[in-house]
Image (cartoon, grey):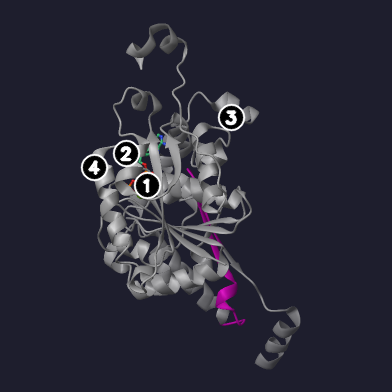
């Protein structure tokens, strides 16, 4: 058991309470349809990017982290090698 | 070689989700690549018990419907990187789980992981049947009390008839996990004895998990008990269970009542 756990042994309930408050606030606000919202966001963002570069759908990672005051949505898109990109741009001109 | 394991019970609230998280984490802690899959559509909880509730973006149903790739829905544990979670949908209903969709996703999971652990919903309906269908190993979670044992018997019947293995004329590998075992009450003869449960259900015993406040603490903090407090009695019992699952034959420890000072002074009256 870590030192932190020794000190925090007294109460795990406050942690539980805070976790639930954050989770439920998000679930109630969005009626639970968060996955749908993120799916729509992802589609539209990818569509914009796809107008400029070819995006491999398997190389897109979406991460969400909900916290109390704000949430972060991370959309990670692996880009093709620079050379490929440059060639594609040149052919566009 | 990858294995699909279902954690099931029939009866609700006996400790399936707790056990899925603990067994999954313990297997991952031993170096295996593990995914835990929540089949409880509409009432997901495995994300909370695993402490991943803030990170759920896509779920099982999104993957089945093609809204997301499997890799996008899987949540990698921040503490053990060989452990992942596929969350259930909180908003759809159970009909969104289609047999073909489940088959496709489980096939894909088999390719990526050594163990695919399915947390079954309670009951004997669609969700529970889909959770068990592809399993080759079943952990039947039972509490030492009459209604739980009866429901486990029912589930064993379904495992032997309604799974892919059964349909192919093969036997599914079944293990009994006794949970919420209260040693003090067992000593007073207030609970069914382990031998009695084994006698009635006649499947091999995988482990006896004591009733423990450590389980509650771990779920409050969002960590499987084997991660949160690996030396606690329930964690050790889960680690032993995992060793047995992997084929080790190790002696069974029956939890014993550990009486505190008050208990020692007043004997049985204060249990
Ligand atoms: N060994 C244990 N000691 C103490 N409490 C436990 C133990 N195992 C489970 N519990 C508690 O029992 C309750 C039900 O557990 P859990 O959610 O794992 O059951 P379940 O079978 O998944 O329920 P459901 O059928 O609703 O899905 C939870 O509050 C959990 O913390
Ligand atoms: Mg459950």
> Which residue is at the front of the view, A30 or B61?
B61
Answer yes or no: are tags 2 and 4 on the same subunit: yes
Gap between marks 2 and 1 measured at Cα: 15 Å
Instruction: Check contact, mark 2 vs mark 1: CB within 8 A.
Output: no
Q: Chain of mark 2?
A: B
Mark positioned earlier in the residue sequence (4 or 1): 1
Of circles 4 and 3, the one toward us is: 4
In the figure, A58 relative to B254: above or below? below
Mark positioned earlier in the residue sequence (2 or 4): 4
Gap between marks 2 and 4 measured at Cα: 14 Å
Q: Chain of mark 3?
A: A
Can the viewer see residue A66?
no
Q: Which residue is mark 3?
A: A5
Answer yes or no: are tags 4 and 1 on the same subunit: yes
Q: Chain of mark 4?
A: B
Of circles 2 and 3, the one toward us is: 2
Gap between marks 4 and 3 measured at Cα: 37 Å
- Is residue A80 in the magenta section? no
Q: Which residue is mark 4?
A: B147
Q: Which residue is mark 2?
A: B196
Instruction: Give the crowd class for mark 3: few <14, some 14-19, many >=20 residues within 10 Å.
Output: few
| Image x and y of residue A77, in percent | 61, 70
Q: Which mark is residue B141?
A: 1
The magenta stretch is A51-74
């Amino acid at each position: 058991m870590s030192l932190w756990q020794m000190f925090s042994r007294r109460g795990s309930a406050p942690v539980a309470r805070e976790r639930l408050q954050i989770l439920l606030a998000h679930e109630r606000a969005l009626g639970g349809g968060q996955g749908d919202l993120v799916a729509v966001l992802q589609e539209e963002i990818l569509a914009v990017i796809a107008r400029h570069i070819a995006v491999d759908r398997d190389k897109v990672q979406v991460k969400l982290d909900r916290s109390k005051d704000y949430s972060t949505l991370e959309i990670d898109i692996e880009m093709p090698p620079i050379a490929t990109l440059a060639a594609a741009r040149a052919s566009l001109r | 070689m990858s294995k699909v394991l279902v954690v099931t019970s029939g009866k609700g609230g006996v400790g399936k989700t707790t056990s899925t998280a603990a067994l999954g984490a313990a297997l991952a802690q031993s170096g295996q690549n593990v995914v835990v899959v929540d089949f409880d559509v509409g009432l997901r909880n495995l994300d909370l018990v695993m402490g991943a509730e803030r990170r759920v973006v896509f779920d099982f149903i999104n993957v089945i419907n093609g809204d997301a790739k499997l890799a996008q829905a899987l949540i990698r544990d921040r503490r053990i990187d060989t452990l992942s979670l596929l969350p259930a949908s909180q908003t759809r209903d159970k009909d969104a789980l289609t047999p073909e969709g489940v088959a496709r996703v489980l096939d894909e999971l088999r390719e990526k992981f050594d163990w695919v652990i399915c947390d079954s919903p309670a009951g004997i309906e669609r969700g529970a049947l889909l959770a068990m269908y592809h399993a080759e190993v079943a952990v039947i979670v039972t509490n030492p009390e009459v209604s739980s044992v009866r429901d486990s018997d029912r589930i064993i019947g379904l495992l032997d008839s309604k799974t892919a293995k059964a349909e192919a004329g093969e036997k599914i590998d079944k293990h009994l996990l006794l949970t919420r075992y209260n040693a003090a009450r067992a000593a007073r003869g207030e609970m069914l004895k382990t031998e009695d449960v084994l006698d009635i259900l006649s499947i091999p015993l995988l482990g006896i998990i004591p009733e423990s406040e450590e389980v509650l603490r771990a779920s409050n903090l969002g960590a499987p008990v084997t991660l949160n407090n690996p030396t606690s009695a329930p964690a050790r019992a889960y680690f032993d269970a995992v060793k047995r699952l992997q084929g080790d034959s190790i002696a069974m420890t029956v939890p014993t009542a550990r009486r505190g000072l008050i208990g020692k002074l007043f004997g049985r009256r204060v249990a």
